[in-house]
Image (cartoon, rainbow, N blue to C red):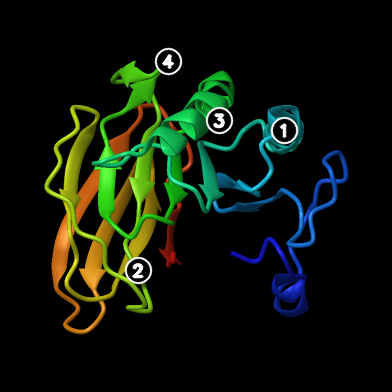
């Protein structure tokens, strides 16, 4: 939503900002490491996929030993009742997430809480990418749907703001989601990798999206 102004840059100083892509008023892709994970923030207003491929390649090359590879972007790939525009965006972005073995993509935009099955090449794949869409943290809008989608494992139309906490522990990544007003846990899931990970540190990171 900051695409048409530099306001975002007035408040945040993102690390490792890409200089390969077309300059956006809202800022370009960036990345950082946290614990045993590397996070890549993508400007989804930019549909020049080669720009994003370059940012992902740089992040992965700088942190080759990161156990987890995580993408954050505003626009959602998969959600119940997906529009034709969203399907087109999925066709653009998902191939590079498969290419770089991304574990999970966090996004928002549609204000419908949902998470996909692991996906690869547009179909369910147990070794694929999980696409997580938060609802709203501020309560500005609530969108409802009763449309099922075979790609979506869980969805819920939220009656109040919500937030999620991401935890990394050993070879597992878990996400727990709570209602903001009552702190009620309404969804949780985890992604596990094969045993043998030597990094047993525990890290927690709160994630909020509009």
As helix, strand or loop, the secondary structure at mark 3 comes to helix
Helix, strand or loop at disc 1?
A: loop
Q: Quadrant of the N terminus?
A: bottom right
In the picture provided, is 63 more to the left or to the right than 74? right
* Image quarter (top left, top right, bottom left or bottom right) of the C terminus: bottom left
Q: In this figure, which residue is indicated by the disc labeled 2?
A: 136
x%, y% of residue 23? 85, 50
Q: Return the residue at label 3.
A: 93
Q: Secondary structure at mark 2?
A: loop
Measure the C-alpha gap from mark 3 to mark 1. 10 Å
In the rendered structure, are the residues bearing label 2 and label 4 in contact, judged by CB atoms less than 8 Å apart?
A: no
Relative horizontal placement of residue 189, taking residue 120 as reference (left or right): left
Give the image quarter of residue 151.
Answer: top left
Q: Is residue 141 visible?
A: yes
Is tag 3's residue or tag 1's residue first in the polypeptide sequence?
Answer: 1
Residue at x 68% of width, y 34% of height = 56
Q: Residue at x 71, y 64 (%)?
A: 4
Q: Earlier in the sequence, mark 3 or mark 4?
A: 3
Spot occupied by residue 108 in the image (x, y as percentages of width and height): 42, 56
As rendered, which of 209 and 142 lies closer to the eye? 142
- In three-dimensional space, the C-alpha distance between marks 3 and 4, rounded to whole angstroms, equals 11 Å
Looking at the image, tell me whether mark 2 or mark 4 is earlier in sequence order: 4
Give the residue pinned by disc 1.
48
Q: Could you give the CA–CA distance between mark 2 and mark 1, rounded to whole angstroms?
A: 27 Å
Q: Residues within 10 Å of mark 2 (few under 14, many from 20)?
A: many
Q: Give me the residue at 65% from left, 49% from top.
A: 43
Of the image marks 1 and 4, the number of the one nearer the N terminus:
1
Rounded to the nearest whole Å, what is the CA distance between mark 1 and mark 4? 19 Å
């Amino acid at each position: 939503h900051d695409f048409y102004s530099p306001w975002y840059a007035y408040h945040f100083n993102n690390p490792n900002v890409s200089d390969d892509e077309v300059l956006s008023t809202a800022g370009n892709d960036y990345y950082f490491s946290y614990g045993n994970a590397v996070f890549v923030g993508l400007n989804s207003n930019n549909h020049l996929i080669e720009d994003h491929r370059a940012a992902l390649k740089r992040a992965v090359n700088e942190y080759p030993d990161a156990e987890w590879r995580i993408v954050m972007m505003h626009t959602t790939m998969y959600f119940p009742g997906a529009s034709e525009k969203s399907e087109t965006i999925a066709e653009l972005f998902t191939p590079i997430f498969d290419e770089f073995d991304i574990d999970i993509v966090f996004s928002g935009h549609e204000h419908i809480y949902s998470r996909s099955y692991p996906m690869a090449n547009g179909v369910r794949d147990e070794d694929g990418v999980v696409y997580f869409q938060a609802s709203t943290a501020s309560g500005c809008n609530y969108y409802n749907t009763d449309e099922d989608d075979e790609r979506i494992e869980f969805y819920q139309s939220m009656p109040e703001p919500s937030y999620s906490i991401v935890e990394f522990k050993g070879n597992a990544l878990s996400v727990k989601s709570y209602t903001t007003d009552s702190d009620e846990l309404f969804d949780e899931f985890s992604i596990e990798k094969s045993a043998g990970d030597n990094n047993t540190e525990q890290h927690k990171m709160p994630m909020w999206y509009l």
